[in-house]
Image: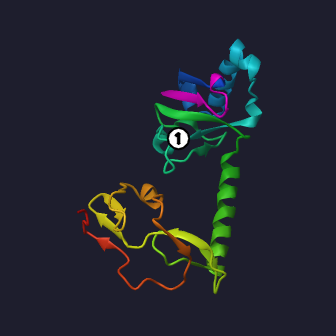
Amino acid sequence: MKVFLHYQDNENSDLHKTLKITLPKSWKNGPTSKVLGQFVESYNANEKLGGANPLDEATLHLAIRKDGSDDESSSHPLIPVASNAVTIESIPDRANVYIMHGPSQTVEEIAAEQKEALEKAKAEKANTVACQHFGCKNRFPKGGPYPECSFHKSPPVFHETAKFWSCCPNKKAYDWEEFQSIPGCCTGTCTDVKEEQKQFLGGCDLRE
């Protein structure tokens, strides 16, 4: 099992480092903290890097993008890796792994944080309404006040694997997260009145 470790969380690119390592078999079923420790040891052993920017393992954590890719688009955000997670279960073979500032969290701590966020979102949903403009993700108190929003003037099109807004046919996406990140083409004020036109144009292709 090989991984590519990247330290880029520093404005000075001269202090960045990429390390390709083959993990010992005994590490595969061990905690990911060993991987972080190995990188920190290698980084600090470098006189130029470690001398100018010594790293402290206790103030760092590992993160990966979905499927271990190196796609830096907004649809592939970095996901923290728990310090006590089993390496082979949380880091794919040949994955790009990023060393980030901020202390690591355990599996239990991440789960508790996710549960809290879910409960908060549930409570917010119960007390707010969603904007009915196409593509706007805002929620606001029932009856207002109504915030400003960015939205699409026409419904989405789902044609085979392509997803796009019928008002913006040249901006296509092929996965849901990428589609959701397409910026609106109109600005205005949120509304709780549902659009009268169709909500989606499934199977249609509005390309000119």
- The residue positioned 67% from the left and 75% from the top of the image is 123
Look at the numbered disc 1 and give the secondary structure of its residue: helix
> Disc 1 marks which residue?
89
Viewer-side residue, 58 vs 140: 140
Count how many numbered circles sit on residues in the image.
1
Residue 201: percent from left, percent from top: 30, 73
Location of residue 85 by image quarter: top right
Residue 36 vertical position relative to residue 148 in the rendered view, above or below: above
- 202 sits to left or right of 183: left
Color theme of the render: rainbow
Q: Amino acid at mark 1?
A: Glu
- 179 sits to left or right of 10: left
- The residue positioned 62% from the left and 79% from the top of the image is 146
Question: Few, some or many C-alpha atoms within 10 Å of disc 1 (few <14, some 14-19, many ≥20)?
Answer: few
- The residue positioned 36% from the left and 68% from the top of the image is 167
Residue 10 forms part of the magenta stretch: yes
Q: Which residues are magenta?
A: 1-14
Residue 39: percent from left, percent from top: 64, 24
Residue 73 vertical position relative to residue 134 in the rendered view, above or below: above
Residue 144: percent from left, percent from top: 65, 83
- The residue positioned 63% from the left and 72% from the top of the image is 122
The quarter in which the C terminus is drawn is bottom left
Residue 136 makes an appearance in the image: no
Location of residue 170 by image quarter: bottom left
Residue 118: percent from left, percent from top: 63, 65
